[in-house]
Image: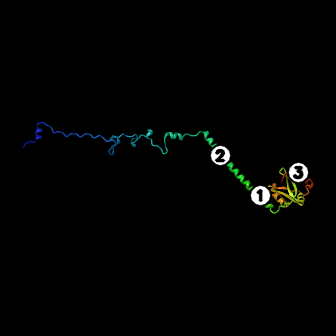
Amino acid sequence: MTDSLRDQLLKLGFKKPEPPARPAVPARTGQRPPPGKPAAAAGQPQRPGGNPQNRNPQRPQDRPQRPGQGKPAQQAKSAVPRSQEEIDLARAYALRDRQEREEKEAARREAELKARERRERRLRLQALVAGKTVNDPAAELLRHFPHRDKIKRVHVNESQLAALNAGALGVVQIEGRYLLVDRETALAVQSVFADALVLLPEPGSQDEDEIAAVEPAVIAAG
């Protein structure tokens, strides 16, 4: 049996040619490492603190941040306390504003109370003298009397002048008007509103001629 050409070459000392080696394939950037191996084994750079097992609690950058923990500059700005002088000044302003509000409210309540009292006073006075005034629209005589450091006057007729001087009639003031009333009504007004009774002579205490002698120069219009 004739040997093949390959066998003859081997007998003559020629070696069997080896197959050519495959070229190495470079690793791709961003290639995921095999399971169970760190990222550095796949050619990727390891980020500081990326692996929890490699973190060092002693390093500030590896310490976990607490809730609400922000940037150091913002924390320092918000944590700066105000001076005691600023705090005292703010308290003084707040106290003054509160006092002003309370004073205004008290003044408003007092004004409302006085207005209500004036209305009630006027209504009670009107109720006391309702239907009891005896002023004569046709009266031509003037009866003068002092009231609030001035000389005032009321129109009367002859009989009313005599009754008024004798104390049977009196004069009360309601809303700037001088009204003639009987003695009983005048005393009732005096018991409730003393300053509303303007004139009520005691019987026999004054002389009609002395009253009529009032100088016209000191008389003020009533």
Q: Residue at (50%, 39%) from the top-left corner?
A: 73
Q: Is residue 142 above or below residue 70?
A: below
Q: Which residue appears farthest toward the top when viewing the image?
A: 13
Q: Quadrant of the C terminus?
A: bottom right
Q: Are marks 1 and 2 in contact (CB under 8 Å)?
A: no
| Residue at the bottom extreme, as displayed | 131
Q: Residue 37 in the image: x percent, y percent?
A: 33, 43
Please indicate whether residue 46 sits to the left or right of residue 189 in the image.
left
Mark 3 surroundings: few (<14), some (14-19) or many (≥20) residues within 10 A: few
CA gap between label 1 and label 3 equals 32 Å
> Residue 161, located in which quarter of the rendered image?
bottom right
User: Residue tagged by mark 3?
Assistant: 216
Residue 51 position within the rendered picture, expressed as x and y whole percent measured from the top left: 39, 42
Q: Which mark is residue 109?
A: none
Display colour scheme: rainbow
Q: Position of residue 165 (x, y in %)?
A: 89, 57
Indicate the amino acid at tag 2: Asp
Observer-side mark, 2 or 3, equals 3
Q: Tag 1: residue type?
A: Arg
Q: CA distance from mark 2 to mark 3?
A: 57 Å
